[in-house]
Amino acid sequence: MMRAVILALAFAASAPAWVESVEFPWATCPQPLWQRELAWLKNIGITHVSLPPGDAAQLNEVIRIVRRLSMEADLEGPVPEALLPLTKAHGGPLTDPLTPVRISVLRPDALTEARERLESGAAAILWTDVEDTFGPAGYKAGAVSFAGEERSGTTPVRRNAQLSAFWRTNFSELKELPATTPPKLPTGITVRQFTGPSGISVVSVINRSNAPWTGEVRALYPVAKKAIGIPSVTVPAHDSLWLPVNIPLLGGNAFAALDHVIYANAELIDMEYENGILAMEFAAPKPGEVILQLSREPYGPLVAGAKPTPFDWDTTEHRARLTFPAGAGPGSKVRIGLAIEPPDATAFFDSAKVLVIGETNHLPAQYSSEAIAQRSRLRTSPGLEVNQQEPGKEPLVLTFDIKVPGTFIHGDHAELAIEADGQQMSHASPQLLRPASLSFPEQIDIHVARNSALPLFPATVPVNQRTGRDVTIAIRNNAPEIRNFELELTADGLDFSPARLPVSVGASTSREVSFRVFTSGATPGLHTGAAKLSGAASATEPVQFLVIPPTGSVSYSVNGFQIEEAARTREVSFGGLKIESVDKSGR
């Protein structure tokens, strides 16, 4: 969803009230994971990272990825002279060092701690322990595993990133009001209200207790200059909600000047108006409601959590009461859409879920009239090359050719928007993906802890010297259509059957295929190879095969691990310390 500019328009422009940052432990996170994890951080709303010091060449590579993702970074200290050209003063991504409040995402009170610090004027929140790490000091668990799986610790950073995108630009303009909530609140529950010059307000409810709390919150309603009750506010244990009060609705001429959100009993994190529909997103750990003051009755329907839902309209007060279900996922996000009026003109993309990196993508858009189609234009993220095809047999359909350069990061998102007559009519955020990718399900993983496995890079596949084996390769086709490929697997000193394999893979799906590995005459140890995909797209993935003798063992080193491998056992050490002992017989 395109970020709303509600608060930015309501107040004079100002510097962000705070910086939301994540410490990215690049020196103890495997380099092949850097792009994936930095893209994930950007996708959840983090646009700034802090980078610990380390090897200059590797640090420069991290900064290059940060720049390609249009993110910012600080170096947790002075910028070395060699990196000065990468500072913001020279158009780069490096900011001045932060003076942040450091909060571990693994703390049970991480979210409440962050909210209290922000309300007290913190200039920056730095989230730590987000990523699994492994280095000379051993393994340290984070909120995200080496496999990219999210644990519960990602909830506070997701929630605060959502909040940051909506409130941080102008929160410094808000001033705390005297309490309007009766003083008899349970121990651990605090309520504070912050209001700006135009009456826009946020009500903070923090629960530092060990039990969930549900109740009514009193808040000043600036329009009526009196206190109102926000009912059925539910705050889980060690959680916090920032509730919106008196937030204007902005949508061109669709709303009167006094149309606004009276209140919601969940966090409002985004708002937009397109094609006659008012859309809002909430962070809602529990089901909630939002009350709108409108100059006229909406014509409906209301869609909440992707389901049609009735709403209440008060004809006397001109108020709409919209209910929504609890949000899903780590951020508890739920989206609702209310049809305000039949639009005079519409434009929308047929399908814009994926743009393939390194290719020209053909993206059709539908228009309600030829006149609107002719007056429209497509806005895109910087760096994308866009051409509009000549109109075809269907005059209400225009097709855009969008070329994505190969320098874009796999997993990032692009922003596309159709504009006409100065109004945004539709937008999409397609994911940017490589055409295809290859992986090896049978590769060796090192279990650095009971619940954490670190794959070897490049992928390392064990093969018995006497019998050989079948090896599986997973082909992921990221294009939105079926594609035909040819796959070839090679390695020094090894033979494969078949030599090449034609394979068809469905749109945006994966398929596994097998090769037989023959080890006749191969010496024990590592054999370097590669899987090469050709045809509809090209991809090359390095791989190495570990040939294991039928008796005895073979020693090898990968990624700093020293490994002793035999037919029935595997012993792994790191820095002289034993990490893992595997009995392959299953006993």
Image: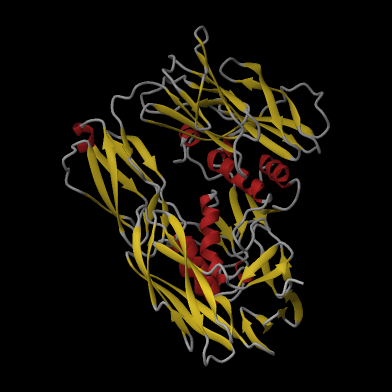
Q: Quick one: quadrant of the C terminus?
A: bottom right
Residue 458: x percent and y percent?
Answer: 54, 76
Tell me where residue 505 appears, x and y as whole percent.
39, 59
Residue at 52%, 61% in the rendered image: 36
Residue 504 x/y as whole percent: 37, 61
Nearer the observer, 585 or 280: 585
256 in relation to 139, above or below:
above
Find residue 374 and report its image quarter.
top left
From this view, report whether residue 27 is shown above or below residue 379.
Answer: below
Residue name at image x 59 percent, y 30 percent: 325
For the question of whether residue 92 can be seen, the reply is no
**Residue 382 in view:** yes
Is residue 561 left or right of 322 when viewed as pictured?
Answer: right
Question: Image quarter for residue 485?
Answer: bottom left
The residue lying toward the viewer, choosing from 495 and 352, is 495
**Does residue 213 appear to the left or right of 90 in the view shown?**
right
The way the protein has been coloured in the rendering is secondary structure
Q: Is residue 190 left or right of residue 482?
A: right
Residue found at the very far front of the displayed protein: 467
Residue at 37% x, 28% y: name it.
252
Residue 351, given in percent of the width and then of the height, sits at: 35, 44
Using the image as rendered, state which of residue 85 and residue 290 is in the foreground.
290
